Image (cartoon, rainbow, N blue to C red):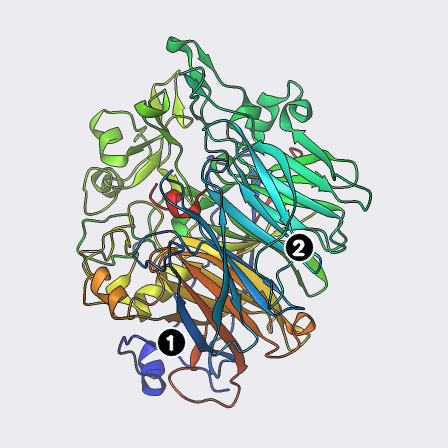
Amino acid sequence: MEDLKSTEAIEDIISTEATEDRISTEASEDRISTEAIDDLIPKMKALILIVLHIAAVFCQFKLNKLSYTKLPYTTNNNFGLLRNAAHQAAYHAQERLLYVLGSQKASNEPRLLHIIDASNPSSPSVIHTHEFSSTENGRANDIAVCPDSVAVSLESPLATKEGHVEMFVPFRRGDSQLVLIGREPVGVDPKGLAFTSDCQKLVIANEGRGDLDPVAQQFVDPPGTVSILLRNDIGTPALVTINFERFLGGREAEYQNKGVRWVYQGNHNAGVINKMSDDLEPDQVTISNDQRFAYVSLPENNAVARIDINSYSVNEIFALGIKNWTLYNTDCSDQDGGANLVRRPIYSMYQATDIDTVILNGQEYVLSANQGVIKRYAAVQGDTFDESKRARTIASDGEFDESSWTSEMSTAVRNNQQLGRWQVRYSDNFDFISRQVKNVMGYGGRSISLWQTQTMSLAFDTGDELETQEFQNYPTTFNGEANNGNQSPVQQVDQRSDDHGPEPTAVASGLYGNNLPIVVVGTRTGLIHMYSDDLLVPRHQSVHREGVTTQPWNTLYTNGQAGDAIITDIRVSTYNRLRTNPNIGWIQNCLPVTTKLLRFDDATSDTSENCMVMEIKISRVGFEQQGIGRSLCGQYYN
């Protein structure tokens, strides 16, 4: 195709007017630099691979909404905004049933699992609602499905105490109840679940969050652990819970030097000592293609753990490293009147939360949504701790090392319309010898990444693409918040720029047709990004947002116009798993409490605005190590 040399040429082909159904149309700027990554990461070297393609193309896929289902937060069919009744979901292909799990936590809130008949995705219906005991269980966090079983992770109703996994016989049409197989105690705050492909082992990430122990009446940070449930045919499954303390074995300083964070080390003035194994907080799980390893995200620690499923042990903990924003545009202020994408010499931790494994070009990768998270404790939890500070506060206290800074950078950190409002890494980035903070570093990569599974080195990152595409296509909801029913999406625009920006919250991969990998990304603001791998690197296909933006969230919810917001789960069911509708995806929305079913359609001959995208310059920045080897709804308000 004929190359395009300017955005004016692009505009001749594609209208740049932002509409509710619009998807990406513009090219991003070059991302080429010959400068080395500075001494912030002296133990890493940068490998920059550039793939250049500038051409107008037709997208290969378009998303067609099949249905949009509001779910009640009680068994009496009460509906409402921000009720956490649609948090995670799993699909049972044989029965064509979608299990949608809520994440209610308060003692007076029911814990619900809705079972949806998805045999006709265009007209799904709730055929059963199961209620978990609120006296025995805290929040339900995740659900996983195999042909012969359904597993749900459940926290304890008491903070810092062990949770459980409940196993059920899959529901069938005509059943009157969901039949319990067993209830197994696991670690504290069980979150992500993943079955091996033979369904014989279930891997559980136990977060182990710090909180006020209701018995001891003091702050306790339970160890983060990983449990493996081994199923058998002769009785109660065998359970092994893996603690990171044995793996670390006195090597805490070694792993800190590699970049694994030990964020909260206790409050020594209050006599609280917190080990590194206590501070590690497993979140989500994905399993390797050969079923040998489970990869577990540790977002607060900016790391991923590799668990050997066969030997029931920690194989390795990999630090994810630091992202250099010198090459990319980002908006770090919620007080600059809207989108203001600027390049500055700043950094951020990737902090992958949701993860998946994907095969691209014969190579296995861990796919991550780099959401970002800040560790904080309030007095009601038994201790007061905040690892971050606003950049302006650090500057006002004279704690930045500005000796090598430009005057523009010194001005920016003191200006709330530039960097002053940005949440900056402080507690473990403060040098107690020099009494200074050397670098301006935030939380979350604001991107998705591919990590090589052997070394967890970075193979691909979307850079500033999520933020740029959202600004170009949906500027009225750019980096927007979604937590106040009395405000409209437009009124909440830009409110997350000082935190995690576009905040990718969910990611999934699948195959289109049987051979072409696709990746789907969901964000806090309710945008859905699609990528494909037809050019040997993931290419941004399109970005979608549904819903009206000019009325309050409460009104939009009542009128069925809220669309997607605070996306907590995205999954793709590919051709080999479905009898009909071979490329179906589903999305869970925390704010409007909805489930949406989508179909991925071939769009190579579609010339409409609904499909046209722009193939752009893609840069891949990888870091090669040298010799050093949530309810999620609630967490979104960090």
Q: Nearer the viewer, mark 2 or mark 1?
A: 2
**From what the image shows, is residue 389 above or below residue 465?**
above
**From what the image shows, is residue 579 above or below residue 439?**
below
Q: Is residue 503 left or right of residue 81?
A: right
Residue at x 18%, y 52% (from the top left corner):
336
Q: Residue furthest right?
A: 234
Q: In this rendered view, identify the residue nearer to me: 630 or 355.
A: 630
Q: In this rendered view, identify the residue nearer to me: 517 or 115.
A: 115
Q: What percent of the width, then of the height, locates residue 16? A: 29, 78
Quadrant of the image occupied by residue 232: top right
**From what the image shows, is residue 570 above or below residue 441?**
below
In the picture of the structure, the residue carrying the numbered disc 1 is: 25
Disc with the residue nearer the chain's start (2 vs 1): 1
The amino acid marked with disc number 1 is Thr
Q: What percent of the width, then of the height, locates residue 200? A: 76, 49
Give the CA distance from mark 2 to mark 1.
47 Å
Residue at x 37%, y 9% (from the top left corner):
269
Q: What percent of the width, then of the height, locates residue 279? A: 51, 27
Circle 2 packing at 10 Å, graded few (<14), some (14-19), many (20+), is some
Q: What percent of the width, then of the height, locates residue 47? A: 58, 51
Residue at x 57%, y 25% (from the top left corner):
277
Q: Is residue 23 visible?
A: yes
Q: Is residue 565 left or right of residue 170?
A: left
In the picture of the structure, the residue carrying the numbered disc 2 is: 169
Q: In this rendered view, identify the residue nearer to me: 332 or 294.
A: 294
Q: Is residue 195 left or right of residue 355?
A: right
